[in-house]
Image (spheres, coloured by chain):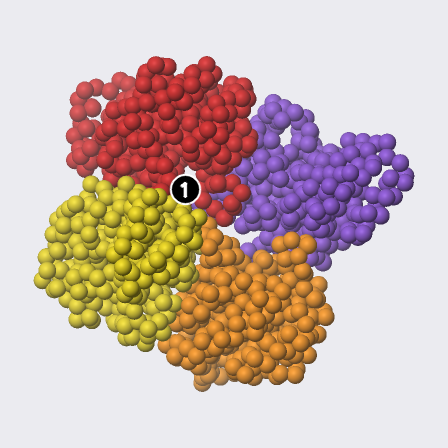
Chain colours: A yellow, B orange, C purple, D red
Amino acid sequence: MIIVLKKEITASQKDKIESFIRSFDSSPSYWKNNGFDVIGLLEQDLSIWENDLKNMDGVEKVIPIKKEYKRVASELPPKIIKYKGVEIGKDTFNVIAGPCTVKSYEELKEIAISLKKKGIRLLRAGAYKLRTSPYSFQGLGEEGLKIIKRVCDETGMLSVSEIVSTEDVEIVSKYIDIVVVGTRNMYAYPLLKKIGKINNPVILKRGFSATLEEWLLAAEYLAESGNSNIILCERGIRTFERYTRNTLDISMIPAVKILSNLPIIIDPSHSTGRSEMVKSICFASMAAGADGLIIEAHYNPIESIVDSRQTIDMEILQEILDQKENLINLWDKK
Amino acid sequence: MIIVLKKEITASQKDKIESFIRSFDSSPSYWKNNGFDVIGLLEQDLSIWENDLKNMDGVEKVIPIKKEYKRVASELPPKIIKYKGVEIGKDTFNVIAGPCTVKSYEELKEIAISLKKKGIRLLRAGAYKLRTSPYSFQGLGEEGLKIIKRVCDETGMLSVSEIVSTEDVEIVSKYIDIVVVGTRNMYAYPLLKKIGKINNPVILKRGFSATLEEWLLAAEYLAESGNSNIILCERGIRTFERYTRNTLDISMIPAVKILSNLPIIIDPSHSTGRSEMVKSICFASMAAGADGLIIEAHYNPIESIVDSRQTIDMEILQEILDQKENLINLWDKK
Amino acid sequence: MIIVLKKEITASQKDKIESFIRSFDSSPSYWKNNGFDVIGLLEQDLSIWENDLKNMDGVEKVIPIKKEYKRVASELPPKIIKYKGVEIGKDTFNVIAGPCTVKSYEELKEIAISLKKKGIRLLRAGAYKLRTSPYSFQGLGEEGLKIIKRVCDETGMLSVSEIVSTEDVEIVSKYIDIVVVGTRNMYAYPLLKKIGKINNPVILKRGFSATLEEWLLAAEYLAESGNSNIILCERGIRTFERYTRNTLDISMIPAVKILSNLPIIIDPSHSTGRSEMVKSICFASMAAGADGLIIEAHYNPIESIVDSRQTIDMEILQEILDQKENLINLWDKK
Amino acid sequence: MIIVLKKEITASQKDKIESFIRSFDSSPSYWKNNGFDVIGLLEQDLSIWENDLKNMDGVEKVIPIKKEYKRVASELPPKIIKYKGVEIGKDTFNVIAGPCTVKSYEELKEIAISLKKKGIRLLRAGAYKLRTSPYSFQGLGEEGLKIIKRVCDETGMLSVSEIVSTEDVEIVSKYIDIVVVGTRNMYAYPLLKKIGKINNPVILKRGFSATLEEWLLAAEYLAESGNSNIILCERGIRTFERYTRNTLDISMIPAVKILSNLPIIIDPSHSTGRSEMVKSICFASMAAGADGLIIEAHYNPIESIVDSRQTIDMEILQEILDQKENLINLWDKK
């Protein structure tokens, strides 16, 4: 339940409201919404007090939230994430691009320069990888983080990279700007709780078999632990279809906007698993109203150490960017 | 395997080629492709004769098709369906709209007039329905077909309606212009074979659990039986996600274009099951390169006798149409 | 809603009840249950009249059915199918075996003789096949039906074979004892309605993506059309797992018994798609309480024209039968 | 690749073999198989040396393993886990039972005493829980571990409990005998690597959307990290069916035995989510050849703090145990 306070509220009215609500909810949240002060009562179902609250002096209106997730619900004002000069959320659109995995400083630098020239400010690259086989390349680890940081420092880009284990939260968040919770970790609640304690924006990928509700509840874990700078990322779900690597669930774009206040971005690379399909899916995502894209891109895709099959080259990336303004304009984004 | 003949081929060269190929394939197909005469050898794997054919006088080139589906493969020239002044396929985009089910002449007429005003030429409406429960409304049957025909005659629109059983092929194809094979009938090969004998264009909806390959092989059944005026329709697949009625597999748009020569349209209504998501999905489909849309629309959605939850009103339909030109232009369509 | 009548009911009491119920339900059904006369009111929700009916003279008790399927619900007495000396349902267990597809009289006869020796009375063999590719073998058709009938006549077995199209209902039901609705036809309601008009017992295979409720509603279509001699058959569902051909949903055995009064049998061949797994699955099915098995078996599996990969030989079949008595005894079957 | 050595091998022959293989594989494994000494070469594909090895003096035979998982493949001798007097694997069958979650010492003690009387030696109880909502009960944590240990010490039972995070590996393995990797953690490779360093047997639950191959590769992570005391546990997969909580994939019992040398047990509680179906599924699992069961049981199921809907009482548990000997005897287990 959210209580919107009147602009002309007096201090004593406010005190009265606060002492009333503190009697049954020990942790109200406070924020501003369109110039109004707002109090969020998120822990318990207080709907029986709705009328009492409505009738208190100084209360503009009361908004109930029936959903199990309270802190990321669409009843709250849209979440705008502002971080080191980048703004993610409503009215904006961000493209994140880069290789699946960092292999060397030279390679990443060259990719970063190409991206920067195209106006891209967010560089993705994996240092820790979860691989299905223990005998596959598992990433460069801290060495990789250092390369990513060096490249970002030199190019003025922000870095985007995955945390795969609770034990790596501290080190990754030291080197990386925007951390990623991968699809296999969406249900790793101890990891989410720990990431809830850091300040970096976090991209929460949907578990490849997670329902929308489970996904939003995973976001609630992050928010409840203290970090509400959450960007949802749809990256395809596991179905019977095998031509594509996963089945991109494009409907999550309007669905998330109906149910949640969080931004949602699309990963066309892991969802399709096929570079020749990425342009079409990027167009679709922008037109559907997504708030961003995270794309695997490389100046020479076949050199990618992991996932080269789904990595696009700089020419296709440019074709996608060429239509960006036109498409995001459909949803008044820029 | 397809044999493209030289423009300057002589009659005796052609005879020689034909008698050679008839020695191992009893049913070659003939058509024109960009001004060249073409012979299709579709029944058997004749790849061992590829070089012999290539070297025959009068042969321009030989194109092998390794896929199990031969008549709807992307190695063939894109299928353009022309029917009563409507053109469906590459370079074009068609919107089909109307109620899920025909209820009365008056209602359908009013809907048709609204659609016509918006420039829509294709009217969808169900007369025979497959309902999960035997106690649900099963459609008006022939009575419904007559209403649809009358409304289309009066408005100059073309009709689009489903055939649910082999026994109805004759009667439906008499009243209806473009027939539909519904999702539950995609595997009904005896029905496909029978529809293969009529001339009406046919919309082949993807079975809600059909793989892309099974879908294209179902199209091959139609083509092999004589009707290659096929329009594929993605309408969502069944997955674990339950917020949407089905999961729209938007990736089928680029995937179909990679593998097949057939046009593909999108059904945003059955896939999402939620009218509030239809606009976003229509934008996505147009941007991804679809060849058309089939939308449930009604001047007053809550009056829809079936599926009112997913039916959009005329205002939202107009918002979709307002962006059509801009979006289909991405793929050089008009 | 079911009304059980008192044994000592008088004619005038019965008249009174009947005229009362006919005022709101035009098609009551009548049957005997454990010596009591029973009236079934299946079309409409008459729960508001429950107390009135309970209090009428001559009424023993009233059993409401809230489920959407009324004629195959577990509130009704268990369905026992008796046909030409075979009894299928509670307290019994039947093994159906034979080749996927009939190829020749000689082959089928040899298989039938082997099965007969093992005490098996029900011979399965396909004459009409639904194949994913139009270029695959589609079955012998009526020629196949004649072979099956001849072999069954000569061996005294009952035949089990699939109907794939509404147009074949008449001819198949003439030659075949127990007809099968295959997995691809579970949603083919016009076909179900037509099979509802014949008297042969019918095996209704679960659609490979059908929910339990859809499956029971498909059975309701058969029952509502007049044929309640229905045997449900679980044959595996389509999931992401690809090691097995389908995923056998063994839980349907207890689930069907909780929700429905129909018998359920298991197809271990199509579900696993691997002959080496069939024995284990047959043991599991018998132990779980299934009412029967339908197994692809051949004296020499690699000779099977279709599905040889999942066909077991006579030795493995014998190993399964050797444990039958022990296992079905768990559920007081014989 | 596995090299089986001749019984009469000389020390110098052995030296020669070892120095040969050490030239291309730095980490051969050694074990005994049916009285023969065996060398495992697991890291690399050495099939090109197969003949050279076969022809060396002292080599009995060479067994190649083509699968991506090498240490848990069926080419190796069946894994028998022996721990504190309990033996799990081929020829044995173990029942693990207890409440979903430990609530209090008194409750757990009473359950343990009931189970002990029935001859059950393995007590399951959760102390750390992964819950979909951050507002649900998350388990008693270390307090719960202490209760479980006390109860097991007092009753002489072995404890079975889940580790949910890398940070808890040390503490859980101190209190608990057999640790569990839950379905949401099957892909948590950093966790698997850490559990690979402890000696406790580990139950590896299948991810609810994991393929068989991914599951076996997860087991390979454990084995490769040093812990091969692995028990696979099938607990149902996520499908479109919603009547059951998950879809139990019973075919995994024969499938695991074909592909792997690890034991497999079944969780009838989480798979069905319905206590009334547990008995049927336990019978099926035993008959199919499973190596054990892990069942949620409570003297009064409705008192269970979590998952009471799927918890059986002591009477049903007894009915299951009453048929155990008869059913596991099918596979020569005792």
Q: Quadrant of residue D53?
A: top left
When the figure is inspected, residue C146 is found, relative to residue D54, above or below; the finding is: below
Question: Residue at (56%, 47%) from the top-left corner?
Answer: C211
When the figure is inspected, residue B286 is found, relative to residue C85, above or below; the finding is: below
Q: Quadrant of the N terminus of chain C?
A: top right
Q: Is residue D42 left or right of residue C223?
A: left
Residue D241 in view of the camera: yes
Residue A102 in view of the camera: no
Q: Position of residue A201 (x, y in %)?
A: 23, 55
For this rendering, which residue is in front, A244 or C53? Answer: C53
Q: Is residue B56 left or right of residue A116?
A: right
Q: Position of residue D193 (x, y in %)?
A: 24, 36
Residue lying furthest right in this view? Answer: C11
Question: Residue at (28%, 18%) from the top-left corner?
Answer: D7
Q: Quadrant of the C terminus of chain C?
A: top right
Residue corresponding to mark 1: D208
